[in-house]
Amino acid sequence: MQPKTKLLHELRAKLRLGQAAATQNQALAALQFLYKHVIDRPLTGLGDVPRARGPVRLPVVLTESEVRKVLAELEGPPWLIAALLYGSGMRILECLTLRVKDVDLERGEIRLRRGKGGKDRVTVLPAALKTPLAEHLRRVRKRWELDLEAGGGAVELPDSLAIKYPNAAREWPWQWIFPAARRHVVRDTGQWRRHHLDASVMQRAMTAAVRRSGISKRASCHTLRHSLATHLIQAGYDIRTIQELMGHRDVSTTMIYLHVLQRGAGRVRSPADRLFGGDALSD
């Protein structure tokens, strides 16, 4: 069987067997890559093969009392990170890659540099978290000063800033707000430095906190972001404001939280309540 015929057969088989959208798109991308970069010929004979779309699922959302229960099971930096995720709507990596200069305690703002889609945006720093964050920064600064004395204290800089500003890597404004506990050695230079806290550390802490709280929902770090958006809509904020705060490119992404609010027992009264009455179900 010719390579093209075999690959076409495999692609059609994946489509016919109802494979996941990611599997179908991967098969199509493999064909396109093969013909463009290996065979060096245009890919023909497929006809109109549209990109497969995955199922649209409603996000998991915690109530305010559930958020409180989860936060009560956390302490130290994981508590502060979780509180910031819920209070500002940041994604987990946006939070972990924050630098000291990105937070304005006086204005109550957090500036996110090159978030998802390479976009910058400003989000809110909850007033209730200013004091805990300031105390956390004092501890981080003390450890950074000890690192400087030991010959370290440098961090990774974006793009070519290390060349343009050779001393910036050891300056306080560029330090990670959530540095890792362990240091690592840069292979090229032999210098040791601290990376930011790895996302897996926070994800494990969140999973354990949800389990200890007794909540049956499959909540993750990203669930805190979903919960904030939903609670803002419940509080009466307009959808455009929430879109800007969350950093969504299209308002249709933000509209998913309206579907969360319009489903379930909170918005619909079951006819069974009228049929059975208040006490009939307990008989």
Image (spheres, rainbow, N blue to C red):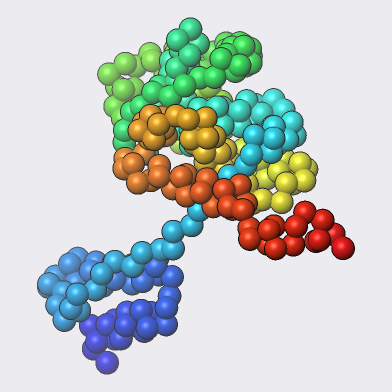
Q: Quadrant of the N terminus?
A: bottom left
Q: Is residue 40 left or right of residue 279?
A: left
Q: Is residue 198 visible?
A: no
**Which residue is outermost to the bottom?**
1
Q: Quadrant of the C terminus?
A: bottom right
Q: Is residue 95 left or right of residue 4?
A: right
- Residue 121 falls in image quadrant: top left
Q: Is residue 47 visible?
A: yes
Q: Residue at x 61, y 28 (%)?
A: 83
Residue nearer the viewer, 92 or 174? 92
Residue 220: percent from the left, percent from the top?
60, 45
- Relative vertical location of residue 22 with respect to residue 241 in this rendering, above or below: below
- Relative vertical location of residue 191 with respect to residue 20 in this rendering, above or below: above
Q: Residue at x 19, y 72 (%)?
A: 35
- Relative vertical location of residue 186 with respect to residue 8 in this rendering, above or below: above
In this rendering, the count of numbered labels is 0
- Residue 274 falls in image quadrant: bottom right
Residue 29: percent from the left, percent from the top?
28, 67
Residue nearer the viewer, 168 or 103? 103
Residue nearer the viewer, 165 or 27? 27
Residue nearer the viewer, 101 or 283? 283
Residue 179: percent from the left, percent from the top?
56, 26
Q: Residue at x 48, y 57 (%)?
A: 57
**Which residue is outermost to the top?**
106
Residue 53: percent from the left, percent from the top?
36, 64
**Which residue is outermost to the left?**
41
Q: Residue at x 18, y 78 (%)?
A: 47
